[in-house]
Image (spheres, rainbow, N blue to C red):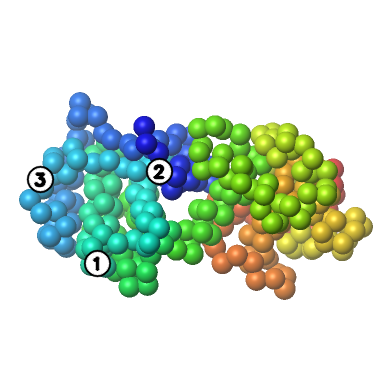
Amino acid sequence: MKIEIAESLTRSWLRHVEKCEFAELNWKPSPTWKIKQRPIIESYFNKAKAFWPEAFGKNSLDQLLKQSEVDVAGFSFNNEMPVTHFVDVAFHAGGLNYGGSQETAKRVFKKLIRSGLLALAYFPNSKAKLYFVSPFTSNTTSKAVESALLNVNDVFSDLELVSAECILNEQFKLNILNEVMMLTGNVADTSELFLRSWQLIEPFTECHIQSADTTLYQSEELVVANDIDREKMLATALYLARFEHHFLNIGNQTETFRHFASQLRIPYGTLRNYRDRFDRYVDNHRQGWNAPLTNELQSIIDRYGDNDEVSLREYIKT
């Protein structure tokens, strides 16, 4: 089976960042499944056609659903209500283009509407999060796609269970790519081709080579360890974002990062990147990454964000 590298990356993102217990590439409904709540599905299909008739041509609802294939589907059950994640991924090295900005927007509208209808048809008792993801999109096309996204959310505006978003360009880098690349020391799964590719390349990158004189990179086991104490790792990153290295009496900033990275059995860059993720949300002089926190990172701030320096220091040093 052919696997697109951007889809492999997105599957890793759903599994490890969005915490989906199941994630599948090229998901299709079975033709043997019955469509649930058909009158409701038809009403939203007709509403979508009224917004943009050309997007669907002569397709009936049944044709639209039978022709469906979701690039990456994720299912999360560790919530008050199950969550279905349907992601359409468009990776065009020369920039997203389906024949002009308006044609591209029309296709994105159709893709997201179709995903929403699929979620309602086959997973009616779960929340549905719909995504269109593309790493390279021109300003003109981005604006057209974002306008189409508003129309999608208007179609489902009376349904709190369905929401759609686009993750384009810099937001793709910040919210998906960087988040997954920071997992390189935590995941050892040969089915995740993007992560395996990055684990092959990362030791030859500049930041890794510059740190090669530390014991951290002298053992392959440390790079691929999958028994990381993530809570302590993230609490340490939060401490360094809030209080820096001055009270720890380990050495300068670099020496402090290397000490904790070795102790936590993670790459030096991973700890630094998580510190940078917290910077924007604490009171310090660094700007940090302009990206929303994941649920996991937000839970660490909720748990340790008000701890005083001494108590948080004692926790991360034990």
Which badge, 2 or 1, comes first in the chain's sequence? 2
Report the label total: 3
Estimate the x, y position of residue 8 in percent, counting from the top left. Answer: 45, 42
Foreground residue among 98 and 228: 98
The type of residue carrying mark 2 is Glu
- Whole-angstrom CA distance, mark 2 to mark 1, is 23 Å
The crowd level at tag 1 (other Cα within 10 Å; few <14, some 14-19, many 20+) is: few
Instruction: Look at mark 3 in the image and give the residue it sits on.
Output: 60
Residue 289 falls in which quadrant of the image?
Answer: bottom right
Point 68% across, 46% down: residue: 203
Judge from the rendering whether residue 6 lies leftward or rightward of residue 26; answer left or right: right
123 lies above or below 297 = above
On the image, the x and y values in percent for residue 45 come to 16, 51
Can the viewer see residue 18 in this picture? no
Q: Residue at x 61, y 52 (%)?
A: 297
| Placement of 170 over or under 198, stated as above or below | below
Q: Label for residue 4?
A: 2
Identify the residue at the far top of this view: 32
Q: Which mark is residue 20?
A: none
Local SS, label 3: loop
- Residue 120 percent location from the top left of the image: 26, 43
Residue 101 visible in the shown view: yes
Three-letter amino acid code of the residue under disc 1: Gly
The outermost residue toward the right is 249
Picture quadrant of residue 198: top right
Q: Which residue is mark 1?
A: 100
Instruction: Bin the neighbour count of mark 3 within 10 Å (Cα to Cα): few under 14, some 14-19, many 20 and up.
Output: few
**Kind of residue at badge 3:** Ser
Which image quadrant for residue 285?
Answer: bottom right
